[in-house]
């Protein structure tokens, strides 16, 4: 029975609750520190799944804290030895295992220049923690399956809590604590996810669309489809999709469209209309019953989830789709070919 990934998917609500309860005071203190220092820019360093968490961070801190956020290319420091002036930035490294060497190198460079550094990790005793001024821990406990699930969503929850504390926004703090219950609503849909995903047993390629904070959801779902199903997916922002990639859409080509309510919804709705005209195989993930009716297949998300938190909820559906499609293909999602878990990716 291939159930390690599935078990860890289902552990996410409890992992988020533990992270917010255990790390809450520390996240409040660090939010106050960011205000006191007048941080006006965030530089992110990350790899793999953590890079998708960084995509969420770009939207999160830009929307909630009104600061520009840049995902840095670590090679600027590790290969090209750029002497970059980081000014009043926060340099945030994200690594579930804490072992990502190039992320550690970015933090070490920034710290040597007197710039504030922080590590977001699931592993307390790790190189990334040693390299940073501040360590922000997720409390996902050991993640055994190669495809990361709970370490991803706990990282998003921790950053959302940090952004709320930095902005002194109690409403966002309240909302992020509701995420575990919304996740549990998605779990209630699993029988239909299992049944409907059989349709994609022979899928070899697809597109995954979203916009705004859920661009991270498109990227992370695409990564899970790659890792577990050996599908070749292409994640896109719906804003970029008409400028070239839409030419790849032939009748019957699968497109997963993440379209939760929010400011990006109208744009996603227009993308769905354009794709329907091209007779794409539309798999719609949305809380809008009206938009769901436009899809070949639809999975309806919980209603009234604020857009800033919806990536934590929507990605659970993406994870479950990847898991069940893998099983329909006869693939063990716990042991993807050519991949292994980075040692130390734990937080006990």
Image: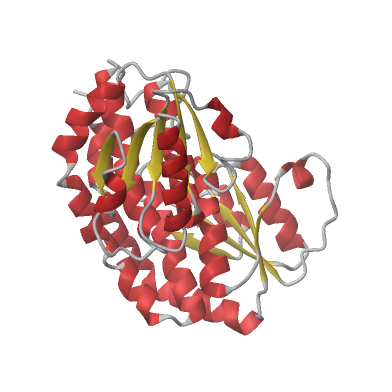
Figure check: 330 above or below 41: above
Closest to the observer, 201 or 265: 265
Closest to the observer, 279 or 87: 279
Q: Residue 178 in the image: x percent, y percent?
A: 26, 66
Q: Residue 312 in the image: x percent, y percent?
A: 36, 54
Residue drawn at the location 82% of the way across and 57% of the way down: 84
Left or right of 133, for residue 215: left
Residue 344 visible in the displayed image? no
Figure check: 91 above or below 74: below
In which quadrant will I find the N terminus?
top left
Q: Residue 122 in the image: x percent, y percent?
A: 43, 51
Residue 283 visible in the displayed image? yes
Looking at this view, name the residue that lies furthest to the front. Answer: 277
Residue drawn at the location 28% of the way across and 46% of the way down: 292
Tell me the colour scheme of the image: secondary structure
Closest to the observer, 6 or 33: 6
Residue 116 position by quadrant: bottom right
Residue drawn at the location 82% of the way across and 63% of the way down: 85
Figure check: 214 above or below 228: below
Residue 333 position by quadrant: top left
Residue drawn at the location 42% of the way across and 21% of the way down: 230
Tally of numbered tags: 0
Q: Residue 9 in the image: x percent, y percent?
A: 27, 42
Left or right of 240, for residue 320: left
């Amino acid at each position: 029975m291939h159930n390690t990934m599935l078990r860890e998917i289902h552990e996410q609500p409890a992992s988020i609750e533990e992270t917010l309860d255990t790390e809450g005071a520390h996240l409040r203190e660090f939010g106050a520190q960011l205000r006191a220092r007048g941080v006006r820019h965030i530089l992110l360093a990350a790899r793999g799944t953590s890079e998708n968490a960084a995509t969420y961070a770009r939207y999160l801190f830009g929307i909630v804290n009104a600061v520009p956020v840049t995902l840095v290319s670590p090679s600027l420091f590790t290969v090209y030895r750029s002497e970059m002036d980081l000014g009043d930035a926060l340099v945030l490294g994200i690594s579930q295992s804490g072992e990502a060497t190039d992320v550690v190198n970015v933090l070490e460079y920034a710290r040597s220049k007197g710039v504030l550094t922080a590590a977001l990790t699931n592993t307390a005793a790790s190189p990334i923690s040693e390299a940073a001024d501040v360590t922000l821990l997720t409390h996902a406990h050991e993640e055994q399956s190669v495809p990361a699930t709970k370490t991803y969503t706990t990282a998003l929850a921790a950053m959302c809590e940090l952004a709320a504390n930095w902005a002194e926004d109690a409403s966002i703090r309240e909302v992020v604590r509701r995420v575990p219950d919304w996740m549990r609503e998605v779990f209630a849909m699993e029988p239909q996810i299992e049944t409907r995903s059989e349709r994609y047993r022979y899928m070899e390629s697809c597109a995954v669309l979203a916009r705004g904070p859920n661009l991270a959801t498109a990227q992370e779902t695409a990564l899970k489809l790659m890792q577990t199903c050996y599908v070749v997916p292409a994640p896109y922002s719906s804003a970029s999709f008409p400028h070239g990639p839409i030419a790849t859409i032939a009748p019957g080509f699968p497109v997963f469209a993440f379209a939760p309510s929010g400011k990006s919804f109208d744009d996603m709705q227009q993308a769905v209309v354009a794709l329907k005209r091209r007779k794409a195989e539309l798999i719609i993930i949305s809380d809008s019953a009206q938009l769901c009716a436009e899809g070949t297949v639809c999975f309806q998300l919980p209603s009234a989830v604020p857009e800033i938190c919806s990536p934590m909820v929507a990605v659970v559906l993406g994870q479950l789709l990847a898991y069940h499609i893998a099983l329909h293909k006869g693939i063990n999602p716990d042991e993807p070919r050519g991949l292994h878990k980075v040692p130390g990716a734990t937080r006990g």
